[in-house]
Amino acid sequence: MDPKTGEAFVFDASAFYGHNEYDTGNWRAPRHRLSEAPYIELYKEKFPVSEPVEDWDARNLLYSLAFNIGNTIYVAGSNQGQV
């Protein structure tokens, strides 16, 4: 609670260091419209690809695993295991 206003607020004390490709890891799955090329290209335009640039796709694939494994385990009827 803010002592001055009495309003509640949320503070996330966790920290994460990674390439900006982590942001798009969840987009990689075909279950999301954001996995389509125009969305990814616009993201890359706004947030330049980290070095080494040639490893972008491999890093993005790696970062997508946490989201996709979670989807496979926790979402009933998920077909993510087929991807």
Image: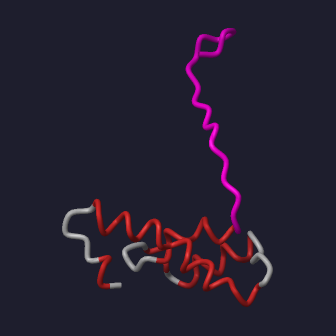
Front-most of 83 and 7?
Answer: 83
Can you give x and y, in whole percent of width and height, for residue 14 in the image? 63, 43
Q: Which residues are magenta?
A: 1-19
Front-most of 13 and 37?
Answer: 13
Check the image and name the residue furthest to the bottom.
54
Q: Quadrant of the C terminus?
A: bottom left
Quarter of the image where one finds residue 22: bottom right
Q: Quadrant of the N terminus?
A: top right
Can you give x and y, in whole percent of width and height, for residue 38 in the image? 58, 82
Q: Main secondary structure of the magenta part?
A: loop
Check the image and name the residue furthest to the left.
77
- The residue depicted at 54 percent of the width and 80 percent of the height is 61
Front-most of 24 and 40?
Answer: 24
Can you give x and y, in whole percent of width and height, for residue 81 in the image? 30, 79
- The residue depicted at 76 percent of the width and 85 percent of the height is 53
Report whether 53 appears left or right of 76: right
Q: Is residue 5 magenta?
A: yes
Front-most of 57 and 44?
Answer: 57
Quarter of the image where one finds residue 29: bottom left
Quarter of the image where one finds residue 77: bottom left
